[in-house]
Image (spheres, grey):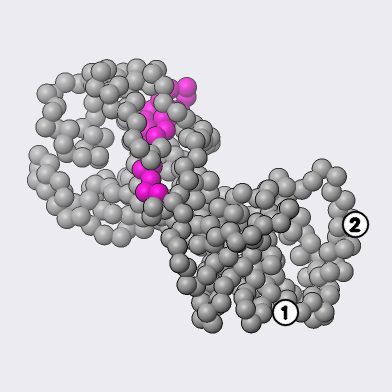
Amino acid sequence: MLSYRIRPASAEDVGFLADVVIEATRAQGRLPGDFDERQWRSGFADWTMQQLRGEIPDSTTSVVEVGDERAGRLRITRTADCIELSGIQLLPGVQRRGIGTAIIEDLKAQAAAVGIPLDLGVEKDNPQARKLYERLGFRQVGETEQECKLRWSPRPDVMPARLALPPLPTLHGESVTLRARRDSDIDDRVREPIDPEEEDAYTSSWRREWDGRRYHARADVAGRFLADEPDAYTWAVEYGGHCIGGAGLRVNRDQHRAAFWIGLFVADLRGRGLGRQVTRLILDWAFSDLGAHRVELEVLATNHRAIRCYLACGFRQEGVRREAELYPDGWHDFIEMAVLASEYAPAP
């Protein structure tokens, strides 16, 4: 997460505060086609100055700074009964870096310290923001024509809702595409020889059935590759017009977490950064569209290339399953890794 600080806004900040509201809204694709920027800025400046002069009761407006640069706007309303997040906007360049989540978590802690709720409103045409708030424990308590009213309570009496599972998306990277599986992907897989290094990275169990053949049987690949799992996402990894592997998430909807896996079966393509592209694409989607709180994985302790990839993508080591699997050369450890939504920083 990027480090940040919050300071009171001044009259010199009014122009910037207008800029950040416009840029954040435009980046979300939510500026209306007939938006009159000049008129809006005039009204916004007058209204903001009223806040800075203390003419709007209980309201404070602040600037969020990253380093020495202004990066966001924060408006809070405080009463004896609740704290209200009345507005938060960040410049697109610092969004999805954990700043918004950290600010909200701090406000939740302030509300919990005095035993009052934290309220906010989210526009109905801003589903991404609503997913973030719901992931952080907010629940709808009302609505207007334009907004849904959400509340976080320090004493919740119900469990958060289970994760909703959107349809499998197609994800496009710099040189790879993640898409739904096709029958033709099986041909791409059986064309490549069996690579013990790749197979061992998943588990040693495959060696119990291996008879030394150089290539997979098509029927075996079809049975595994096209099988569906409940509450899971499976993508084919396409590169240069061919399938070169697969990747996916196994979702625990109750706990808002997912287990990540990836396998690239074309040995000649390793070391080109394709695994990082795939991992980043899936993490970006898991923390934004899916709304996961945590993504976790296990990796063979001797798979140093994969470990470097996961560390570069934001995963942290959490533990070791010691001597977890038996291989021909003895027992091997598996490393447990995970990354949380609050600490994940998407690639620029």
For marks 2 and 1, the one nearer the N-term is 2
Q: Mark 1, residues whose alpha carbon is within 10 Å: few (<14), some, or many (≥20)? A: some
Q: Is residue 192 above or below residue 106?
A: above
Q: Residue at x 77, y 64 (%)?
A: 16
Q: Residue at x 58, y 70 (%)?
A: 118
Quadrant location of residue 340? bottom left
Taking the magenta stretch, the answer to whether it contains residue 237 is: yes
Q: Which residue is mark 1?
A: 58
Q: Magenta region, mostly helix, strand or loop? A: strand
Q: In the image, which residues are magenta?
A: 234-253
Q: Residue at x 73, y 76 (%)?
A: 59
Q: Is residue 101 above or below residue 52?
A: above
Residue 234 position, x and y percent, is: 39, 34
Residue 214 in sight:
yes
Q: Is residue 59 left or right of residue 118?
A: right
Residue 312 position, x and y percent, is: 42, 52
2 vs 1, front mark: 1
Query: Residue type at mark 2?
Result: Gln
Q: Residue at x 84, y 73 (%)?
A: 49
Return the mark for residue 39. 2
Give the spatial CA distance, label 2 vs label 1.
27 Å
